[in-house]
Amino acid sequence: MTLSGTVINGTVVLDDPHDLPEGARVEVVIKPVEGKTTLQKVLLKHAGCVTDLPADMAEQHDHYIHGTPKR
């Protein structure tokens, strides 16, 4: 038997109600949500597209972005 559902607030909510016996063992297989773009995918599209940054940008980003003194 295969049941489908969605995680809502940390609880698996089945699409169709079923009376499962108390103590029944189940196996949960996580499937990626189709059609949704993750933040990681959105940000990775921009990775490496800026090529004219200072060599110490990663170390001194507060200086370059907010104007704080270099460390």
Image (cartoon, rainbow, N blue to C red):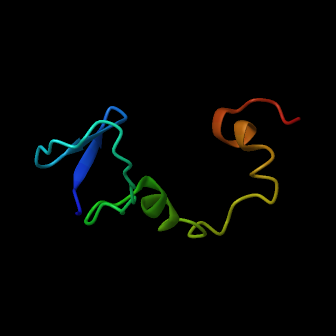
Q: Is residue 4 above or below residue 9?
A: below
Left or right placement of residue 8 versus residue 67 in this view: left
Q: What residue is rendered at 65% in x and 33% in y?
A: 66
Front in this rendered view, residue 62 or 37: 37
Which quadrant is the N terminus positioned in?
bottom left
The quarter of the picture where residue 63 lies is: top right
Q: What residue is rendered at 47% in x and 68% in y?
A: 45
Could you tell me residue 2's position as x and y percent?
Answer: 23, 62
Left or right placement of residue 68 versus residue 35 in this view: right
Q: Is residue 2 above or below residue 10?
A: below
Which quadrant is the C terminus positioned in?
top right
Q: Is residue 31 above or below residue 23?
A: below
Could you tell me residue 42's position as x and y percent?
Answer: 42, 60
Seen as rendered, the residue at the extreme left is: 16
The quarter of the picture where residue 29 lies is: bottom left
Q: What residue is rendered at 67% in x and 66% in y?
A: 52
Front in this rendered view, residue 3 or 51: 3
The quarter of the picture where residue 47 lies is: bottom right
Front in this rendered view, residue 13 or 56: 13
Could you tell me residue 41's position as x and y percent?
Answer: 45, 63
Could you tell me residue 19's position as x and y percent?
Answer: 15, 41
Seen as rendered, the residue at the extreme right is: 71
Q: What residue is rendered at 75% in x and 29% in y?
A: 68
Q: Is residue 5 above or below residue 32?
A: above
Question: How many numbered discs, if any?
Answer: 0
Front in this rendered view, residue 54 or 1: 1
